[in-house]
Image: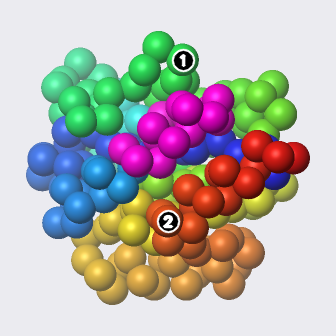
Amino acid sequence: MKPAVIVIDMLKEFVYGRLRSPQAQEIIPVIKRIIDHAHNRDIPVIYVADRHFPVDHELKVWGVHALHDSSESEIIDELKPGSKDYVLYKRSYSGFRDTGLDMLLRDLGVDTVVLTGIHTHICVLHTAWDAFYHGYNILVVRDGVAAFSREDHEYALKYMEKVYGAKIVESGEVLKLLEGSMKD
Ligand code: ZN
């Protein structure tokens, strides 16, 4: 297994702003542990982050959020990317759409994406769909993703498991799997 940790939309908008997840604060330390673990083992960490222009189609659904020139589109201080991390910007739900993520994963030799972040049923789910489409194995960290509600969260996890063959795993298990990946 050649994994990469994908951190989706851990931005001020979705953690502290109007479109925040009530569980956002709980997943911060979980994601931090996974990132630290990855850094110590030279596993790539890739952030994908909403950075909208006012004309973006998606704003018709959700209203104005995470504009490119606003503080809401900044990654939260608690999870600031390090110098070796990758940061890609997106203008719609999926971390793959027009961001160069697939090319980056291929250049890194990655075959498995470990999905963390917000929201389980929107950007995480659409990133999982594109990961499936591009042929990657998918791990979704159950306690490292969050939605607007528990129902949205649980529904999306079930959907990704059934439809994309994603493995839904607890963070403790992910840490062990990342450990094992170094032996490949
Ligand atoms: Zn957005």
- Marks 1 and 2, the one that precedes in the sequence: 1
Q: Give residue 139's position: percent from left, percent from top.
A: 63, 63
Categorize mark 1 by other alpha carbons within 10 Å: few (<14), some (14-19), many (20+). few
Q: In the image, what residue occupies the spot 38% across and 76% down?
A: 153
Residue tagged by mark 1?
A: 84
The span picked out in magenta is 32-47
The image's colouring method is rainbow
Residue 69, above or below 47? above
Categorize mark 2 by other alpha carbons within 10 Å: few (<14), some (14-19), many (20+). few
Q: Is mark 1 within 8 Å of ligand 1?
A: no
Which is more toward the observer, 134 or 60?
A: 134
In the image, residue 98 lies in the stretch drawn in magenta:
no
Q: Which mark is residue 183?
A: none
Q: Give residue 97's position: percent from left, percent from top.
A: 61, 40
Secondary structure under badge 2? helix
In the image, residue 41 lies in the stretch drawn in magenta:
yes
How many marks can you see? 2
Q: In the image, what residue occupies the spot 81% across and 25% down?
A: 107
Residue 5 picture quarter = top right
Q: In the image, what residue occupies the spot 24% across and 49% down?
A: 14
**Which kind of residue does numbered mark 2 sit on?**
Gly
Q: CA distance from mark 1 to mark 2?
A: 24 Å
Q: Give residue 92's position: percent from left, percent from top.
A: 47, 44
Q: Which mark is residue 172?
A: 2
Q: Is mark 2 within 8 Å of ligand 1?
A: no
